[in-house]
Amino acid sequence: MKAVKVYEAQDKMINLIRDNYNVLQSLSAFGISLGFGDKTVEETCLSNKVDTTTFLAIVNMTINGATDYKLDNLSVSTLLHYLEACHRYYLDYQLPFVRRELSESIYINDKLGKLILQMYDEYAKEINKHMNYEERMLFPYVKGLMEGQASSSYNIDTFVKQHTEADKSLRELKSLIIKYLPSGMHNSNKLNSTLFLIHNNEEWLGNHQEVEDKMFVPLVRKMEEEIKSARLNTVISAFANADNTEDAEVLSEREKEVIIAVVQGMSNKEIAEHLCISVNTAITHRKNIARKLQIHSPAGLTIYAIVNGLISIPNN
């Protein structure tokens, strides 16, 4: 069995293309122009202002399924630009081109021919909806993350839940044509050429979705986690750097015990039973704590308790 080659930065770009001509479809999505001579992959990427690591990660994944890249080494901006350009390539060029080829290869005056073309139009409408959603919701959200802004109403899991197979309908259409279109209803040579074109698009869409699922989604999720972590650290630092000595002194020992109980998730009734006080007294302590510290939420009290040494953070 022939060993699969994993391309590296010092390989010549022309050799990569010669080995895998389907990569030509991706070059324009990266903004890489032809005419690169004998430059290496790295030299070609640098001259076209493309991140070499991200380019190789995508190319090696789509060519041979290689997944030995590290998310930390990928460029979010390069990946986002690639996906946006892929959408424009497919929606603006490939979809109308395939429709034109299909309409010229089958006799659409017949009812069956019309149904086939109708199926393609329905598929085109669905793929437009699919990609336009990403351009309207996902891509702006990611651009916000790149600027350190996270939405409270949208995240990557929202996208994943509605992310469906983009190539499924195209695969079905191709199969129906091959199996059921009578010989007298099409131009055989033209149709075979069109079917090969549909197959290439089906493969391209599969690769496109794999890049989204295995690279883009995990990378965006990582960005979300980093922003959340940074925000928590900022809040804790603000508490730690603030002058909380005066607040800590005005709290009674009983009020500190109430804070610990709240942090542990106890209700007012449970706090009263735990400290052998009445429920009304427990409620009064909580009101006094909120007034003194200007903290009203259990999460805020948890941060206060951590910063002031009332509780400790588990190591695990």
Image: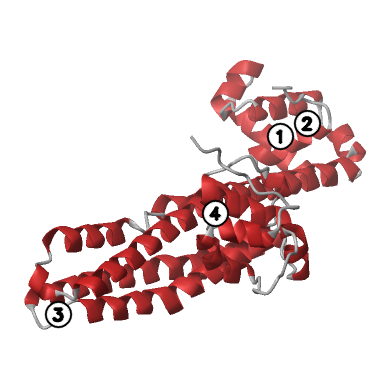
The answer to the question of whether label 2 and label 1 lie on touching residues, with beta carbons closer than 8 A, is yes
Mark 4 = which residue?
Answer: 155
Residue 127 is left or right of residue 32, and the answer is: left
The answer to the question of whether label 1 and label 3 lie on touching residues, with beta carbons closer than 8 A, is no
Amino acid found under the numbered disc labelled 3? Tyr
Quadrant holding the C terminus:
top right
Mark 2 = which residue?
Answer: 306
Determine which of the numbered discs, if any, sits on residue 107 in the image. Answer: 3
**Which residue does the image show at 58% across and 60% down from the upper left?**
18
Amino acid found under the numbered disc labelled 1? Thr
**Which residue does the image show at 44% across and 67% down from the upper left?**
131
> As displayed, is residue 201 above or below residue 11?
below
Distance between the alpha carbons at the discs numbered 2 and 3: 75 Å
Amino acid found under the numbered disc labelled 2? Ile
Q: Quadrant of residue 243?
A: top right
**For discs 2 and 3, the disc positioned in front in the rendered view:** 3
Mark 3: which secondary structure? Answer: loop
Mark 1 = which residue?
Answer: 302
Distance between the alpha carbons at the discs numbered 1 and 3: 71 Å
Mark 1: which secondary structure? Answer: helix
Q: Return the disc, 4 or 1, that comes first in the chain's sequence.
A: 4
